[in-house]
Image: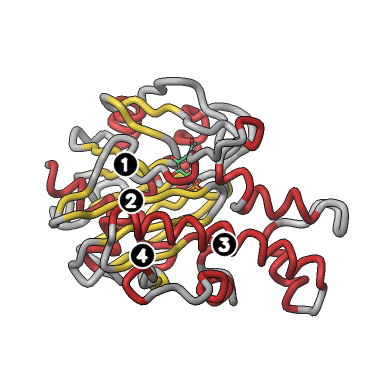
Amino acid sequence: MTRPDTVLALDIGGTKMLAALVRGDAVVETFKMPTPRGGDPEQWLTALFDAISGWKGRYDTVGVAVTGIIDDGCWSPLNRKTLDIPERFPLVATVKRLSGSNAVFAANDAQAAAWGEYCFGAGAQENLVFLTISTGIGGGIVVNGSLLGGLGGHFGLLRSLDEDAGVLEDHVSGNWIAAQAAPHQAGASAREVFAASAAGQGWAADIIQASARQTALLCRNIKLMLDPARIVIGGGIGLAPGYLESVRKALGSLPPRLTPQLHAAALTESAGVVGIADLAKRQS
Ligand code: BMX
């Protein structure tokens, strides 16, 4: 028997794909698999729905949060280094076919997580900016109870005046941390870099501090641009042991009025599925 209050929520990021059955802020059941590095979204989604085929009949509405941008139900990349997908993949139509549901809503992953934290997590119903420091850097902005859509919050794609420097996330996030570690520990993942730092490896601590300094500068600039009551930080890097403290230290001594108030994401990796589930229910 279908539970009308149960939503199938998918969160597809550059590193992992998470499927969850969600009721309000409660995650009832989950399934997680790595985001394949090859193939295309059609194959990835087919594999994901095959894996959760036992959930059929337990949901009506489907919410899909993805890294990248959604326009008219179609999914496109903004930074192929974060996830290399074709332009304007027909995401909503594909999920409708695979799920058998006609109530499918898609949004950017970080915007969905921002909404989840605003409604049920560390947002406390105040104006907030959410940052996920993960494969890339994603963001979401909630102002006066409304979530900004479209490109809103795509802080990872900010550029400096140095045209050759590329985009911000290519100097901060998980992909960058792993690339910086290569000369010290071949093939090390960002998670392994944090482990090496915790084990006293100075090279690893230096990489993490360099990332944290960039994130701190981003938070200072967000405070000046949007003056959110709080900046909620999530993502595999953002929630890694010691990272948020490193960002706070890197803020340095700012006048209190200019100091961003940083909070760890309360919903951790569930923020995206909880947020997209609520957004999808509001649309259906
Ligand atoms: C990139 C961009 C954003 C995304 C952010 C975090 C792509 C594919 N993604 O800036 O849309 O929110 O990365 O992505 O262009 P994640 O996979 O780290 O959650």
In the structure shown, which secondary structural element does the residue marked by tag 1 occupy?
Answer: loop
Give me the disc on residue 231: 4
User: Which residue is labeled 3 in the image?
Assistant: 237
Q: Marks 4 and 3, Cα distance to the nearest angstrom?
A: 15 Å
Mark 1 near mark 2, Cβ–Cβ under 8 Å? Answer: yes
Question: Viewer-proximal residue, 66 or 53?
Answer: 66
User: Which residue is labeled 1 in the image?
Assistant: 152
Q: Marks 2 and 3, Cα distance to the nearest angstrom?
A: 17 Å
Question: Viewer-proximal residue, 230 or 80?
Answer: 230
Could you tell me the amino acid type at mark 1? Gly
Mark 4 or mark 1: name the one nearer the start of the chain: 1
Q: Does residue 17 lie above or below 270 as drawn?
A: above
Q: State the residue at coordinates (17%, 52%).
A: 2
Mark 2 or mark 3: name the one nearer the start of the chain: 2
Q: Marks 1 and 2, Cα distance to the nearest angstrom?
A: 7 Å
Could you tell me the amino acid type at mark 2? Gly
**To which quarter of the image does residue 90 belong?**
top left
**To which quarter of the image does residue 162 belong?**
top right
